[in-house]
Image: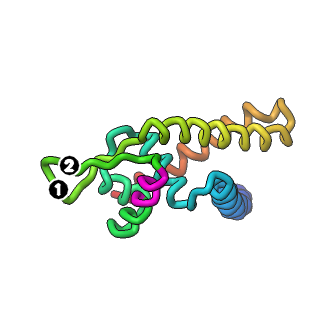
Amino acid sequence: MEQQELRQSASKLADLTFKLLSSCHEKEERLATQQYLTLAEFRCLRQINEIENINNKEIAERMDLSASRLTRIIDGLVAKGYVIREIEPNDRRNMRLYLSENGKEFTRKLNDAYVDIHAQILGDIETGQHKPLITAMTGLLSAVEKWMAQEEK
């Protein structure tokens, strides 16, 4: 019976994570659109903001993009005044990417808007459920990361 319960729970979790992922993608897309960004620009800005002094190769790998596709995204962010790029002296094929002052301010506002969205979402959940929800999601993320690490071996 335990195995059957595990399979039923796994089936429910699979369905919920699929729906949650889809909703999260839509949530990001809506926020990006509100800020006059493409979804790719939004995600690229978040990567640059997360890791200062990142190069284009690292971002392309993290976002699973070709170098040419990433270049077009970065061109758009440079044109909007959010990103500064510098050619790496040791490897002229790579660029170092930084947020401009305008980009830093914009990403602060973008992050605030992102947190506000999640505050609104939490507002529809009973306050007493917030901590258990975060604990459960943290555990789920940890388990997924552990599974992924095992699959990479």
Q: Position of residue 95 (x, y in %)?
A: 27, 52
Quadrant, the N terminus: bottom right
Three-letter code, disc 1: Arg
- Residue found at x 71% / y 62%: 19
Q: Which mark is residue 9?
A: none
| Marks 2 and 1 close (CB-CB < 8 Å) | yes
Residue pushed farthest left?
A: 90
Q: Position of residue 5 (x, y in %)?
A: 73, 58
Q: Which residue is mark 2?
A: 88
- Name the quadrant containing residue 132: top right
Mark 2 lies on a secondary structure that is loop
Three-letter code, disc 2: Glu
In-front residue for pair 114/1: 114
- Residue found at x 65% / y 43%: 114
Q: Is the residue marked by circle 1 packed among few (<14), some (14-19), or many (20+) residues within 10 Å?
A: few
- Residue found at x 86% / y 36%: 126
Q: Judge whether residue 136 is colored magenta.
A: no
Q: Position of residue 92 (x, y in %)?
A: 17, 56
Q: CA distance from mark 2 to mark 1?
A: 5 Å
- Name the quadrant containing residue 2: bottom right
Magenta segment's dominant SS is: helix
Quadrant, the C terminus: bottom left
Q: Which residue is mark 1?
A: 92
Mark 1 lies on a secondary structure that is loop
- Tell me where the magenta segment starts and ends, as one range: 74-80
| Residue 35 seen from this side | yes
